[in-house]
Amino acid sequence: MNAIAKRFRLQERGTNVKTEVLAGLTTFVTMAYILIVQPNAIMGGNATMVDADGVLLTKEAIMVSCALVSGIITILMGLYADMPFALSTGLGSNFMFGAMIQTGTCSLGRAMAITLISGIIFVILSLVGIRDLIVRMMPKCLKLAIGCSIGFFIAYIGFKNSGIGSYTNGISMGNFKDPAVLLAIFGLFLIATLTAFKVNGAILIGIFAVTLIGIPMGITTLPSQLVSVPSLENLGSLIFNFDFKGFFQPETFVLMFIVFVGDFFSTLGTVLGVGGKAGMLDENGDLPNIQKPFLVDAIGTVVGACTGNTTITTFVESSAGVEAGGRTGLTAVVTGLLYLCSFFVAPIFLMVPNAATGPALIFVGFLMVGGIVNVDFSDFTEAFGPFVMIMASAFMGSIAVGIAAGILSYLFIKVVTGKFKEIHPGMYVLAVPLIMYFIFN
């Protein structure tokens, strides 16, 4: 135990093994849903299907591959970067490629070829320092707004998944006659009450309590078996499945650009936002050694492409573990190990209902919006960009879109007010791909 504490410098960062393990468990529980979402994103309602290249795909193989890569890359994040960030297949590109695969307009191999090239570009940019250069040249007000944007985005996911909020026909109140919605509201108040009384692990306790209460209410569905051995029979169809035929078609480059820019700014926002919540940022709003999590994230995308997974990215749900006290890479290692264990006990983790995880995400969102008070709202040219970033993230349901919109809005208002000299020249260069992102996405 002492060796672990020394390896991760637990005392130096004001934490301990128990807290880090609890934080890792919290992070895993809040993002374990990806093990359900990823197979459904790629396969839709099909348990098995044959893609455009005649390759047999199964949901079980995709789930196993997702769990394996998520576990390995998250452990790498903990050991190499020593930061409490967890990774898995990011939302966005998986649904985009999944829709194309299901309609036969794109094979899994082609999707993985696009993901692979994007990942290699990520690795190169991370190694030469381009990604952290972009972070350093961004104004502090935008960096502060990123954490708040993620907070609103996480809360949006929580309201949507729990049913407390409805987004089918505009934005409206959910069905408060639904027992699952009422249980989710109870969970939110339970977490808030426990936090008010400074109870450690309030979020995790809330998740487990709602899950257990949901059993007699019929909201939590008990699995037929708690332990299962997954089949690896069809995993081979995902390994090194690349289709480069017609790779140089214009549509391919558009898809690659969407994947690249979306993941770039989603990761940037998550790393800065969660890092800020953990108290890791310096006086300029930068994260020391940010090139390490960037490199791990990039390697994850390359490894993911080689194993049939869409873009691997750092998850905003890592903030739940940070709120539970996680401050070191040990949190990530614990989360990664739980992903590997999920091979055999997935039914236990996957039975946690949205009524349990939704309130946790809403509460984490609340905890992340506090940084906005440090933005100078007395200066309109400083505040307008952060405002657009926050609102776009929440109402457009995308961190990448929110960050891109916020940066472009900041540049626009500075230029039209004659304050263009306050902007780093590199920001103008950055504006070009961001404008293209909105045009092609």
Image: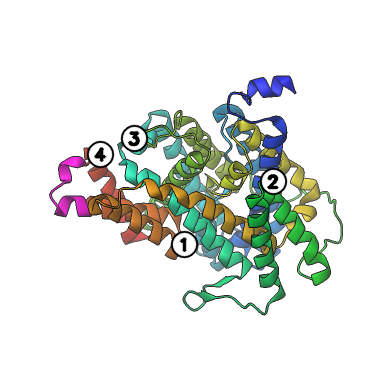
- For disc 4, the marked residue is 426
Of the two numbered discs 4 and 2 on the same chain, state the one appearing first in sequence.
Answer: 2
Which of the pair 255/423 is nearer the observer?
A: 423
Q: Amino acid at mark 3?
A: Arg
Q: Amino acid at mark 1?
A: Gly
Image point 44% across, 33% down: which residue? 287
Query: Which of the two discs, 3 and 4, sits closer to the camera?
Result: 3
- Contact flag, marks 3 and 1 (Cβ < 8 Å): no
Distance of label 3 from label 4 (alpha carbons): 10 Å
Q: Residue furthest left?
A: 418
Q: Which residue is mark 1?
A: 397
Choose the circle earlier in sequence order: 3 or 4.
Answer: 3
State the residue position of label 2. 201
- What's the magenta region? 413-422
Tell me the SS state at disc 4: helix
Within 10 angstroms of label 3, few (less than 14), some, or many (20 or more) residues? Answer: some
As helix, strand or loop, the secondary structure at mark 2 comes to loop
Mark pair 1, 4: CA separation: 27 Å
Q: Which is nearer the N-term, disc 3 or disc 2?
A: 3
Q: CA distance from mark 4 to mark 2?
A: 42 Å
Q: Is residue 56 visible?
A: no
Amino acid, disc 2: Gly
Q: CA distance from mark 3 to mark 1?
A: 26 Å
Q: Amino acid at mark 4?
A: Gly
Q: Nearer the viewer, residue 250 or 316?
A: 316
Instruction: State how far apart marks 3 and 2 are (Cα).
Output: 34 Å
Can you say whether 20 is above or below 430 in the image?
above
List the residue tagged with mark 3.
136
Give the foreground label among 2 and 1. Answer: 2
Alpha-carbon neighbours of circle 2 within 10 Å: few (<14), some, or many (≥20)? some
Q: Give the mark nearer the N terminus: 1 vs 4.
A: 1
